[in-house]
Image: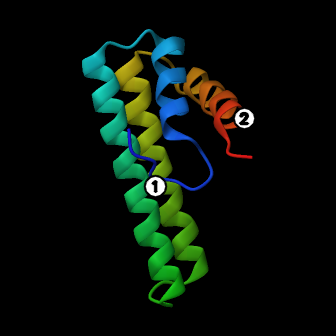
Amino acid sequence: EKNYSSNVNNACYLSTAVETFNLSEEKKATLNKLLKDKLENRAIVKKQIRASEIPEDDAKTEMKKVNQKYFKALAELTGKSKKEVMVFEKEAKQKCSKK
């Protein structure tokens, strides 16, 4: 699993998700793609900010849309509520953040 983000170890994130949600290899692969898509979309927005192509307020809205789409897909993939997904996200970020 390639790292797509500078702050979170994606291999750790994926293994934590597999453990937490008891995901099959197929669902793990799906999650890896969802994570990759989220991080690529966030990178596009960040690039647009740096290039002054979109205002800061619009960028925040776009980032929120990217995150909401990811969390909704993660909830559907795992069969968990959004609240449970958000608890997982917070715990996984703490556990897997690069020091």
Q: Quadrant of residue 28?
A: top left
In the rendered image, the quadrant that contains the N terminus is top left
Q: Is residue 33 left or right of residue 58?
A: left
Residue 81's disc is none
Element carrying mark 1? helix
Q: Is residue 98 left or right of residue 82?
A: right
Identity of the amino acid at label 2? Answer: Gln
Graded by Cα atoms within 10 Å as few (under 14), some (14 to 19) or many (20 or more), the crowding at tag 1 reads some
Q: Residue at x 60, y 79 (%)?
A: 56
Mark found first going from the N terminus, 2 or 1: 1
Q: Residue at x 53, y 72 (%)?
A: 59
Closest to the observer: 24 or 66?
Answer: 24
Total numbered circles: 2
Q: Give the CA distance from mark 2 to mark 1.
A: 23 Å
**Where residue 91 sits in the image (x, y, percent)?**
69, 28
Closest to the observer: 93 or 12?
Answer: 12
In this view, 65 is above or below 58: above
Q: Residue at x 45, y 81 (%)?
A: 48
Element carrying mark 2? helix
Q: Residue at x 46, y 78 (%)?
A: 47
Mark closer to the observer (2, 1): 2
Q: Which residue is mark 2?
A: 94
**Where residue 73 sits in the image (x, y, percent)?**
37, 34
Q: Quadrant of residue 18?
A: top left
**Where residue 16 sits in the image (x, y, percent)?**
54, 22
- Pick out the residue farthest to the left: 26
In this view, 17 is above or below 62: above
Residue 65's disc is 1
- Labelled pair 2, 1 in contact (Cβ < 8 Å): no
